[in-house]
Every structure is written in structure tokens, then in C-alpha cells.
Image (cartoon, rainbow, N blue to C red):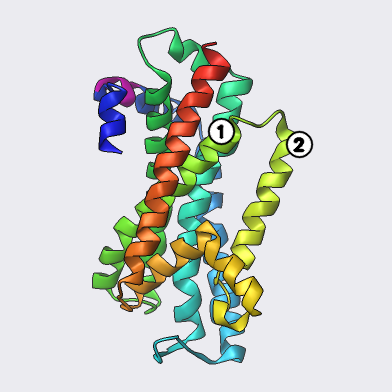
Amino acid sequence: MVSLLLAARISPSRVGAVINRNVGALRSGPSYWLVLLSGFFEPVLYLLSIGVGVGALVGDLTLPGGRVVEYAVFVAPAMLAVSAMSGALSETTFNFFFKMKYSKTFDAVLATPVKPFEIALGELAWAMVRSSVYTGAFLVVMVALGLTGPGWALAAFPATMLVGLAFGAVGMAISTFMRGWQDFDLLTTGQFALFLFSGTFSPVQDYPAVVEVLVRLTPLYHAVELVRGLVIGELGWGLLGNAAYLLAMVAAGLTLAARRIHRTLCA
């Protein structure tokens, strides 16, 4: 990733200018703040309804390592990972597509010395800010409910930032292929399938063998495993594999998004 940035001759000031444009848009009115708030409350409501409510009926779960935890403790890290994913995707899919396709924001930005790769970096950094606000607030809720300790919450926060970067980069790359708003139905369907079948509400070992293998290949599964391991203190070498998977997503998504922006807007 570092060599990629050096080869592209990235200017931090130009990336900062892209981020600053988004900050300016944030100050334009209260509507954007309402969208931000709605994105935070969705995973919190899932946690309260399924993790706490349904958890009272499910009882305790035994993790692969033999540790027994309450169902809410099992579900909460998954909702944290989902919050990071959703926060990043909200910026790099719908908002990114609108800027590129309809408001022509990127056309205007490219009329300046800013390069396509710097646009991709700036938009991804801005998406990570939104994702981090969600996950930071969600961790406070988890600590307040006694679902994790403050130390494990601090340990998990960088992992949630990595999750936001990974899904933000891939979401941005996918958005460059979108032809219109109707194509986003496919994206939301895929996102919802990931939400349900990535070890979020039940251990993947409970699935049939074939389904379990498929789930282990999906990105949200690795995000959930990484965050869950840090939140509940189940550390192991497998977490490094989960982190490597997400880092590969960042590199691939960012590179493809920059190339697609150049091809679509600069050709």
C-alpha cells in the first residue's frame, strides 16, 4: 500500500482538500446530520431487539474455544462490525455515486491539480470518519450495557476503522460500475445477505458444511471475527488472517476505484 501511494505521488494537502469539501457540505444544513443519526441507531436497535430481547430466550452460547457467553455478548461485536460497514458504505456508495454521476462534483475537482487517486483517498478518509463516529458511539453503548470492558473497547476501535476502510474502498469501487439508482438494489440485497449470514446472529459452525465454507469466504465474516475476538478477549493467530483479508480489500478497492474514476471522468 505504501509503495502504491508513493508511486501515485500522493499529495496530503490535495487529499485534505477533498476531505475539506465534504466538511463544508456537512455545514450546509441539518439534513445531513439527520442522515448521520439514523445510521447510528439502526445497529443499536438490532442489538437491543435481537441481542438483548431474543437473547433472553436463547440463553448462553458456547464459543469454539469452549468459553460460554451471553447471547447479547455474542451479537454485540457483530453489530459493531455491521455499524462500521454500513457507515462506510453509506458514504462510498450512494453519496459517492451522486457526486460522480449527477452533481458532477468530481468533474469540478479534477479541473484542479487533484488526481483521481487523491479523490479516492479523500472520499475513503471521509467515509472512515463517519464509520468511526458510529463505532465509537456504539462502543460507548456496549461498555454502558456491560457487554465489554473499556480496555477491550479501546483495543477493538482500530479494528473497526480497518473494517470501515475495507468496506468503504470496495463500496467506492463498486459504485463506479453503477449505471443508475436501480443498480443499488443489487448492492443492498448483497449487504443484507452478508448482515444475516456472516456469523452475526449464530456461530458459523451451526450451518451445514458447504454453507459454512461459503460464509468463511465473505468479507463481513472476517470483520465480525476480528472485532468479536478483540471485544470479548478471544485472541489468536486467526485474527491476523482476518486483518490481512481486510487489508487486501482496502488495497484492491482503492486501486480499482481510482482507475475507474480516471477512466470514467478523465478519458
Residue 118 position in % (x across, y down) = 37, 24
Tell me which corner region of the image, top left, top right, bottom left or bottom right, holds residue 206. Answer: bottom right
Question: Which class describes the residues within 10 Å of circle 2: few (<14), some (14-19), or many (20+)?
Answer: few
Residue 17 position in % (x across, y down) = 33, 21
Q: Nearer the viewer, residue 231 or 215?
A: 215
Q: Is residue 26 left or right of residue 265?
A: left
Outermost residue to the right? 182
Q: Amino acid at mark 1?
A: Asn
Q: Amino acid at mark 2?
A: Gln
- Residue 186, compared with residue 13, is above or below; it is below
Dot 1: what SS?
helix
- Quadrant where the image shows the N terminus: top left
Q: Which residues are magenta?
A: 13-17
Residue 67 position in % (x across, y down) = 39, 90
Q: Nearer the viewer, mark 1 or mark 2?
A: 2
How far, Cα to Cα, is label 1 from label 2?
Answer: 15 Å
Q: Is residue 184 left or right of residue 141?
A: right
Residue at figure coordinates x 37%, y 50% from the top left? 247
Given contact means CB atoms under 8 Å apart, are the residues at marks 1 and 2 in contact? no
Residue at figure coordinates x 72%, y 29% from the top left? 180
Q: Which residue is mark 1?
A: 95
Tell me which corner region of the image, top left, top right, bottom left or bottom right, holds residue 101. Answer: top right
Task: Identify the disc placed on residue 210.
Answer: none
| Majority SS type along the magenta span | helix
Residue at figure coordinates x 46%, y 63% from the top left? 222
Q: Which residue is mark 2?
A: 182
Q: Is residue 178 left or right of residue 143?
A: right
- Quadrant where the image shows the C terminus: top right
Dot 2: what SS?
helix
Compare marks 1 and 2 and give the one earlier in the sequence. 1
